[in-house]
Amino acid sequence: MVTIQDRIKEIEEELRNTEYNKATQKHIGLLKAKLSRLEIEAVSHKKGGGEGFSIPKSGDSTAALVGFPNVGKSSLLNDLTSQKSEIGNFAFTTLRVVPGILHYKGAQIQILDLPGIIENASAGSGRGREVLSIVRNADLVLVVTDVDAKGVDRIIFELHRAGIVLNRRKRNIAIKKSNSGGIRIHKPRKVSVKDDEIKDVLKEFKITNAEVFIRESITMDDLIDHLKGNTIYVPGVFVVNKIDLPHDPENIEKLKHHGRVIEVSASARIGIDELKEAIYQSLELIRVYLREKSGYVDTERPLLLKKGAIVRDVVRKISREMLEAFRYAIITGPQRKQNELRVGLDYELLDGDVMTIISKN
């Protein structure tokens, strides 16, 4: 009897053996759609969850160290934080999740040292599902490899299979299912994916009647990720460890099309400061300082928020009572042209802003 896993392996093999070009583009897209649908079925049919990992989130944001065993994730955790994770020159040293806190520019960033990812982790091998479930809750993924840079494509593939997409934003796609009328597609002319390709992918997900609204340029992968329904989009930084060892720079250069690459040596403490800055920048945090009535500003303990935060987010962090009593805020900051701005709750904040809250009382 052919199982779901057998069919998944057959499609994976066909994908590996099919060269990507204009002639095979549609075929590859359909194979990916079939693979995604089968993986969803496999998860729904699987009984029991086994022992999982549970780690409470702390700090202002969380970054997860992801990579194959024995690439130096534990050493990096020790360099970035005050936590001491067990280090050994053999696979699977880290049998549990070890958290630490990186203190940087007023932010407290939780770093998680996770068990090594192995082949078919997304299908459950090596407790992969438990590990990947923690990665899904992280605000940043640090993909760690060594100077050989082997296996990064496989890690990205395993993450993608688990619904985790790195360094790509969610596309503006909406699908409204109906009971009749077939598939009607509304999209700009610049969208290169053809209508028949879209319809074929939808049929793989058992959608035969729907209105599809595509409001920007997309790829087949974008459409499949939308249809999977569990896809999250997370920033990623690629960390090449052991840079002090002999290596071929070309191996590292090839990684750059995936995203930002930072070269480090945990043992020689090379590039650690650059990695800290890359983590901070990738999380897109902003610091907001509160000025008390006396005029005192605590520069050691800013409020940390995500880029795009507004005054309402700061006031809500303080208390609900403050939100109800809010009258206006006075904003100053190094990125402001005016000395003082009088603003309301929906005003967007910038890094380094100093805020005075004026209440009705």
Image (cartoon, rainbow, N blue to C red):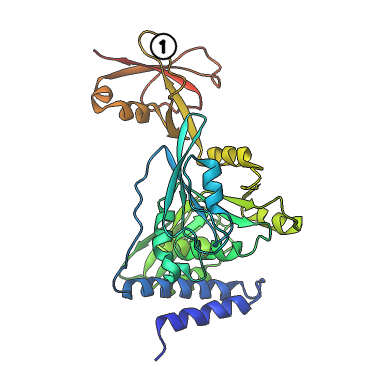
Horizontal and vertical percent position of residue 282: 54, 42
Q: Position of residue 157 (x, y in %)?
A: 54, 65
Q: Residue at x 50, y 24 (%)?
A: 352
Q: Is residue 63 above or below residue 359?
A: below
In the rendered structure, the answer to whether residue 12 lies left or right of residue 37 reads right
For the residue labelled by badge 1, is the local secondary structure a helix, a strand or a loop? Answer: loop
> Residue 290, relative to residue 120: is it above or below?
above
In this view of the protein, can residue 260 be seen by the observer? yes
Which residue is situated farthest in the bottom direction here? 1
Position of residue 345 relative to residue 170, above or below, is above
Placement of the N terminus among the 4 image quadrants: bottom left
Residue in front for this viewpoint, 109 or 96: 96
* Depicted 44 relative to depicted 82: above or below: below
Residue 130, by quadrant, is bottom left
- Rendering coords of residue 202 (x, y %): 43, 70
Label count reads 1
Label 1: how many residues lie within 10 Å, few (<14), some (14-19) or many (20+)?
few
Q: Is residue 168 visible?
A: no
Q: Residue furthest top?
A: 294
Q: Position of residue 189 (x, y in %)?
A: 57, 57
Where, quadrant-wise, is the C terminus in this rendering? top left
Query: What amino acid is found at the position of numbered circle 1 in the picture?
Result: Tyr
- Quarter of the view holding residue 330: top left
Of 74 and 359, the residue lying toward us:
74
Tag 1 residue: 296
Q: Residue at 48% of width from left, 39% of height from top?
A: 82
